[in-house]
Amino acid sequence: MKRVLVTTGGGDCPGLNAVIRAIVKRASQEQDWEVIGSIQSFDGILREPTEIMVLDERVVAGIHIQGGTIIGTTNKGGPFAWPIKNRDGSWDAVDRSDEMIRKLQYLGIDAVINVGGDGSQRISQQLYEKGLNIIGVPKTIDNDLSATDFTFGFQTAVQIATEAVDKLVTTASSHNRVLILEVMGRNAGWIALHAAIAGGAEVCLIPEIPYDIDKVKEKLQSRYNRGKGHAIVVIAEGAMPIGGELSTEASSEVGYHNLRLGGVAHKLTHELKQAGLEADIRETVLGHLQRGGVPVAYDRVLATQFGVKAFEMILADQFGQMVSYRHPDIIAVSLLEAINHPNLVSPQSALVNTARGVGISFGD
Ligand code: F6P
């Protein structure tokens, strides 16, 4: 019997369960494969006692429509930076990757499929360089991984953000207000851009196009005539004014190395008031609602394609590679290519041009 270990790492994302199900269903078509899930990414392997579960067709039945991941996830620590507590109460990180690889051998794991975003795929590459038979599956609602046209979870997040814009429009128009919607997107404004176009927002602020607050104010002011009118601003959490800085919040969570973003909508309200905008302004922070719930059909399909391909890459010995969607194909690309640079919105792209074409201002 051969064994493939499946891990889901980083922030969760609608479609993870559809990937897991597809791996199990495809593996069941081969005579001699067993699929094992590690709980909370590689932590399940590193913990004592080990936390793993057998993933068979019975366990994965129907899970493609569920959000989250049945094997859990984490965006803290990991095999190369495992947090340990010192006697004085402070925390250090230790490299437990060699120990983990030995444990995988002991458990009879022949191959690993690591489903995750850029941080997780960096771990995949490091483990591959240490000799592990590993394959990456890209995941992120932010759609900021290059080497793939889309990641699953993104369309679901866009749908949720668009529905939020639709709801905000009715209350904004009733009160003649400016309503600001803060969406996720650390480095990339894909969610904000798609939701702004789909929802018909007036302003879209994204990390890739730093904004001039006076231009934003002008656009919003132009929506008002003698106090009547309304406007919607969609802002990505990583957006900033020209020459400005990211809006961040300190995190005291052990092993959490990401910069925690937050507060950009609030900051924008303040800047608009300072710039002299007279309209009433309210903010909505969509937050983790964008990552929760049932994946839309598109994400279920893409996730299923990724799961089937990942298992077939194991059969073809395509280790050190990541599954990728290059329309209309599902292909294998090197992990190195995938983690080399992020997938950002190009200010010159057709989509930005479309947005400008329907009058959306980027504040530039
Ligand atoms: O990377 C995906 C993402 O959703 C980012 O857009 C966001 O900044 C981050 O995760 C939030 O992560 P957490 O769940 O740790 O708050």
Image (spheres, grey):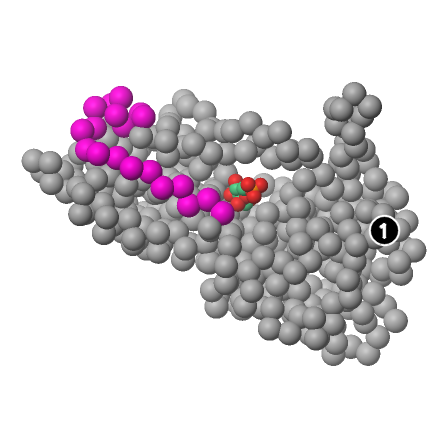
Q: Is residue 352 above or below residue 111?
A: above
Per the image, the residue denoted by label 1 is 49
Taking the spot 78% from the left edge, 42% from the top edge, the residue there is 79
Image coords of residue 6 (percent x, y) = 73, 59
Secondary structure of the residue carrying numbered label 1: loop
Is residue 271 magenta-colored? yes
- The N terminus: image quadrant: bottom right
Chain part drawn in magenta: 270-288
Residue 141 shown left or right of residue 92 in the figure: left
Label 1 CB sits under 8 Å from any ligand 1 atom: no
Residue 356 shown left or right of residue 91 in the figure: left
Question: Image quadrant of residue 135?
Answer: bottom right
Taking the spot 56% from the left edge, 48% from the top edge, the residue there is 145
Q: Is residue 132 above or below residue 15?
A: above
What kind of residue is marked 1?
A: Pro
Image coords of residue 265 (percent x, y) = 37, 34
State which image quarter holds ligand 1.
top right
Taking the spot 50% from the left edge, 62% from the top edge, the residue there is 295
Residue 238 shown left or right of residue 333 in the figure: left
Taking the spot 89% from the left edge, 61% from the top edge, the residue there is 108
Image coords of residue 187 (percent x, y) = 50, 38
